[in-house]
Amino acid sequence: MHLGSWLIGFLCAAALGLWWTRRIIRSLRRLTQAAQAYARGELTQAVPPVPVREVNALARSLGAMAEALRSRIGELTVQRNQATAILESMAEGVVALDPQGRIVLMNPAAAVLLGTARDRAMGRHAEEVMRHPDMQELVRAALQQHRRSMKDILLFQPKERILRLHGVPCQAGGPLLRRQRPPADVLVAGGLEGPSAVLVIQDVTESHWYEQLRKEFVANVSHELKSPLTAIRSLTETLLTGGALEDQSKNRQFVGMIDEEAARLSRLIEDLLALSQIESKAMPLKLALVELRPLAESVVASLKPSITSRGIAVALEFPDGFAVRADPDRLQQILFNLADNAIKYNTTGGRVTLSAASTGPWATVTVADTGIGIPDQDVPRLFERFYRVDKARSRELGGTGLGLSIVKHIVEAHGGTVSVESRVNQGSRFSFTIPLAS
C-alpha cells in the first residue's frame, strides 16, 4: 500500500516536472527566436510573455534591449542621413580612402571636379581615379606619411581649371574620430577602422583668375599714372632748371604740354572712378525713358571739333520716337565712348554711322565706322581694362584704355550685352543691347 502510494506520487511529480520543463523549454525557444530576429535586425518583433518568473525577467530585459537598439539605430540613421545630406550638397568635393587607398566615399561634387562617375570610382584605388602625379603624391602623403598637405593643381581636361586639394590623415581612434564618428556607411565600406584619409577638393579657378586680374590692374594703373606724372615732372624740371621759363618762344609750349599731360591724368582718374562706381554699384542706375536721336545728336555735337578736324561724315539712323529704358547719363557715356573711338581710329574723310533697331523687347544700338579696323587676335580682349590694340597711337590720341571696359560694364548693368565685328582696313562695328521703352 505504501509502495503504491509512493509510486503514484513519484509518477505525478515526474509528470509535473516534465510539464514544467517543457513549458520552460518552449519559453526559452521563443526567447531564442526573438534573439535571433534581433540579431538579423528585426527589432520590431515583440518578446512574448513567459509564465516563469525568472525567465520572464530575461524576456523583459531582452525586450528593453530591443527597444534601446531601435532608439539608438534611429538616432544613428538620422545622423547618417544628416551627414549624407551635408556631403551631397557641399560645393567642395570630399573623398574618403581606406588604409589601402581605395575610395570608400565620394560626394557628387568630387565626382564632377575629378571628371569621373561615382559608381565607377567606388572601391577603386585613388591613383586609378586621380591620374595627376601631384594628386597621387598628396594621397601618399596622407596615407603613408600621415601628414596634412595642400596643393593647387592645374588641370587641362575636360577644361582648364585649378583645383585645390587638402589631404588629411584620419586614423581610427585619433582625435578627429573621437570627436565625431564618420557616417555608418563609411565605417562599413572602410572596415572597422573607418577611413584612413580624407581629401577635400575645391575649384579655385575663379579665385586665381580674380587675383591675376587684380595684380594686372594694379600694375596697369601704376604704369598709366606714372607716364603722365613723369612727363609733367620732366617738363617742369626743364622749365625751372633749363632756362626755358624765361624763353618766351618755349615757355608757352612747355606749359601747353604740361596741360595736356595733366588733362590726360585727369581723364584717367575720372575713368577709374567711373569704372569703380559701376562695378561696385555705388551709383545705382536712374532708369528713365530716353529717346535715342536727341541723345546721339548731343554726343555728336560734343565731338564736333574732332569730327571737323578729321573730315569725318557722321550719319544718325534712328527711327522717329525710338526710345529705350535706361540711365540717360550712362547711356550718353556709352555712345560718347563708342563714337569717340570711331572718330579717333577712322581714316581721314571716313564715315561714322550711329543706328538702332528693335529685336523683341530689346533695342540694338550700333556704332559703325570705316576706320583702320581691329586684328582678329585682339578682338576677344578689347573690353579688358587698359587693353590697347595700338598702344602708341592710343596714348597719342589721349586714350586711357578704359573706355570700352566702361561701356561693357554699363551695358551689363542694364542687363544687355555688347559685341564687336571688325576687319582690318575696312572698319569696325560695335553693337550693344538695351531694354526698349515699354
Image (cartoon, rainbow, N blue to C red):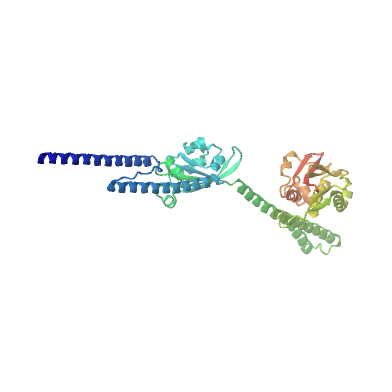
Q: Quadrant of residue 9?
A: top left
Farthest residue to the top: give it. Answer: 120
Q: Is residue 416 left or right of residue 185?
A: right
Percent coordinates x, y for residue 36 in the rendering: 35, 40
**Could you say which is closer to the camera, residue 147 or residue 96?**
96
Q: Quick one: quadrant of the N terminus?
A: top left
Please name whichever residue, 87 or 196, is drawn nearer the observer in this view of the structure: 87
357 or 370, nearer to the observer? 357
Residue 278 image point, x, y percent: 72, 54
Is residue 343 visible from the viewing direction of this image?
A: yes
Figure quadrant of residue 16: top left
- Residue 327 percent across, percent down from the top left: 78, 53
**Front in this rendered view, residue 303 or 183:** 183
**Residue 397 visible in the displayed image:** no
Q: Position of residue 356 (x, y in %)?
A: 83, 44
Number of numbered discs: 0
| Residue drawn at x 36%, y 47% as measured from the top left | 63
When the figure is inspected, residue 217 is found, relative to residue 347, above or below; the finding is below
